[in-house]
Image (tube, grey):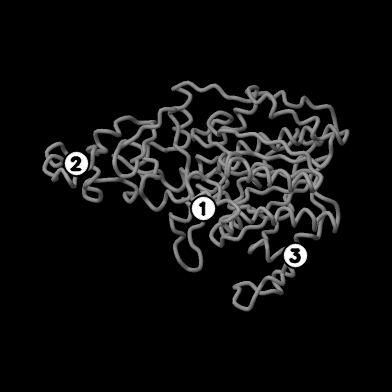
Amino acid sequence: MEKTYKVGGMFAGIGGICLGFQQAELNGIAGYGLEWANEMDEYACETYRINFSHKLIAGDINKVLNPDLADKGDPLSKEYYQLMNQEILKNKIDVLTGGFPCQAFSIAGERRGFEDERGNLFWSIVNLVELLGATHVKPRILFLENVKNLKSHDRGRTYSVIKGEIEKLGYIVKEHVLNTMSYSCLPQNRERIYIICFLQKDDADKFTMFEHMERFEFSHDVHDRENEIKKIIDYAEKADEKYYYTKEKYPHYFLTVEEYENIPKQERKNVRVNLDEQIDEMFKFYQVRRGMYVRKNKSDVCPTLTANMGTGGHNVPLIRDNWGIRKLTPAETLKLQGFPVGKGFKIPLRYKGKPFADSNVYKQAGNAVSVPIIKLLATELLKVLAENDKLGKFIIDEPDINAYQQMSLWNQ
């Protein structure tokens, strides 16, 4: 590789952003090298470790940046955080990425924003940029991701603060909301805001992708969606019995007309639910909404995966296969985010002597980013960086959609 741009990843989760950057490259001319990644959740760290070989800085990022915050009751020592502080500041990085915690701003959450401790983790990005600037130089690009609702949270004031603070650091900020189902071959409705910040004006000027995203849109018909879903879900093999919904396990989801009418009116729900009758098509996704009615996704894609879909309720996407009605398996949810499970990406089997729980994987998938979207954005950024660094002349913002579709179909 003629040029490798160094990447540091904050709030790395199981590595969706890291994987997208790792996959992006320009015909052997330029690519990205992952220097380090930081993550606090111990189960996400375990998944990350078995899939990446570079340095993982586990622990609270605020304590990594300021080891004096660690106290005696902390599971990780002050000495550990001091070592990690040295590690994170050891080398100059070109790109700093961060899918900073979104629960504070999400429509699905309480939307408390900066009042929520997780919302305040945004400030650790500012702090790290300043520390890197004092030690080496500020990252050339900041690549941030969050929920769509970040832009409108608190009538736009939250995003105004975020953008303003990044601009104070000297960056030019560009942002756009992208839906996974529109810009990749992944059949999932997932709208996220991508915030890309440039330290150099030449880089910002050349990156005009967000001004004409229509060039990057995929066209899908019903047959395309069916084929994409088949690449995610194995309809030829029966899943583990625990994923199936049966009348024995969920009697209130399989009510006959007679059973429904025998329920006293004051105790009866407004709509009778019978999954066998209402989930009647294969290659479609359904949900039981609030436990009261069944809804089929009208876009022929999976509803947005959520971090709490492993806990039951209305967040669980359901499908019909040849053996009945079931929820998606943990592996399938990761595939819906673009992780090549079974083709290089591994799910931990055990952790600390115990089986790795499905709920951990569901949470990780719901918190993750869609890898092909990251790869698309990282590739377009690479063209900008490489051309401005005189590595060659690249056609910026003019994607070869056919080539991109092929690179997105990792499990073809």
Farthest-out residue, bottom:
72
Circle 1 sits in a helix, a strand or a loop, which is it? loop
Position of residue 16 measured from the top left corner of the image (x, y, whole percent) = 60, 46
Q: Residue 255 carries which label?
A: 2
Residue indicated by mark 1: 347
From the viewer's perspective, is 34 left or right of 351?
Answer: right
The amino acid marked with disc number 1 is Ile
Sequence-wise first label, 1 or 2: 2
Position of residue 40 measured from the top left corner of the image (x, y, whole percent) = 60, 61
The amino acid marked with disc number 3 is Asn
Mark 2 Cα-neighbour bin, 10 Å: few <14, some 14–19, many ≥20: some
User: Residues under labels 3 and 1: Cα distance?
Assistant: 29 Å
Circle 3 sits in a helix, a strand or a loop, which is it? helix
From the viewer's perspective, is 236 left or right of 202?
Answer: left
Q: Which of the two marks, 1 or 2, is nearer to us in this view?
A: 2
Position of residue 341 measured from the top left corner of the image (x, y, whole percent) = 52, 45
Q: Which mark is residue 51?
A: none
Circle 2 sits in a helix, a strand or a loop, which is it? loop
Residue indicated by mark 3: 85
Mark 1 Cα-neighbour bin, 10 Å: few <14, some 14–19, many ≥20: some
For the N terminus, the image quarter is top right
The amino acid marked with disc number 2 is Leu
Residue nearer the viewer, 171 or 248: 171
User: Residues under labels 3 and 2: Cα distance?
Assistant: 58 Å
The quarter of the displayed image where residue 136 is located: bottom right
Sequence-wise first label, 3 or 1: 3
Q: Which of the two marks, 3 or 1, is nearer to us in this view?
A: 3
- Residue at the image point whose x is 13% and y is 45% from the top: 264
State whether residue 204 appears in this view: yes
**As displayed, is residue 187 above or below residue 310?**
above
**Mark 1 in CB contact with mark 2 (< 8 angstroms):** no
- Residue at the image point whose x is 70% and y is 64% from the top: 64
